[in-house]
Image (cartoon, rainbow, N blue to C red):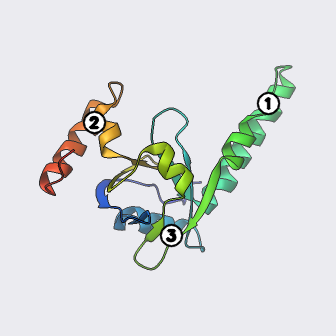
Amino acid sequence: MADRELFEGFALQAVDQKGRVAIPADLRAAAERNSDIRQIVVGLHPEDPCLSAHDLSWSKEKYDRLDRREQQAVEAGQDVDLRAKRRAFGQVEKAPFDDSGRFVIPPFFRMKAGIQKWALFYGSGETFDIWAPERLMGDPNADPMLREICEYLCQSKGVKL
């Protein structure tokens, strides 16, 4: 994990009718440095009403962490969450991206996140979030700074929500 590139930064990107969108340059560069395969893994965020995405090498790291957590629970005589791996690896889709970072947001996840014409990308370290700006701005539990960034980006691009 020490030599993994982290996902940092934010950007507002246009989404076409087919759900194609470009991963912002900084996030794409991190994904490319972390994995030899131009593909991201997309799923629902575990807490927020948005998507969470990461490069393929993070999947292996995530699996190892969940496996260690299971082993520790067994050794401590605690119950093991048998659904954790199912949620982490079954409720995702892989999405290849091209040289410019364009990929198609998997339709089920695009629908669940409410992403239409715009997508806000937001780095979260090992992963990055993909928000529907309308959903973010309407979420009373959203981080106030994240909402402020979204509002600024929408204003700077002339996007009316």
Q: Quadrant of the N terminus?
A: bottom right
Q: Residues within 10 Å of mark 1 (few under 14, many from 20)?
A: few
SS of the residue under disc 3: helix
- Sequence-first disc among 1 and 3: 3
> Closest to the observer: 60 or 101?
101
Residue 31 seen in this snapshot: yes
Q: Are marks 1 and 3 in contact (CB under 8 Å)?
A: no
- Measured as percent of width and height from the top left, residue 104 is found at 49, 65
Report the Cα–Cα distance between label 1 and label 2.
40 Å
Question: Which callout, 2 or 3, points to the residue nearer the camera?
Answer: 2
| Residue type at tag 3 | Arg
Under circle 2, the secondary element is helix
Residue at 30% across / 41% down in the picture?
Answer: 134
**Dots 1, 2 in contact, CB < 8 A:** no
Check disc 2 and report the residue beneath it: 137
Name the residue beneath numbered marker 3.
33
Classify the position of the C terminus by image quarter.
top left
Closer to the N terminus: mark 2 or mark 3? 3
121 w.r.t. 99: above or below: above
Which quadrant of the view contains residue 17?
bottom left
Distance between the alpha carbons at the discs numbered 2 and 3 = 32 Å
Q: Is residue 30 left or right of residue 135?
A: right
Mark nearest the camera among 1 and 2 is 2
- In the rendered structure, which amino acid carries the disc numbered 2? Met
Task: Find disc 1 in the rendering and name its residue.
Answer: 72
The alpha-carbon separation of the residues under discs 1 and 3 comes to: 31 Å
Type of the residue with mark 1: Gln
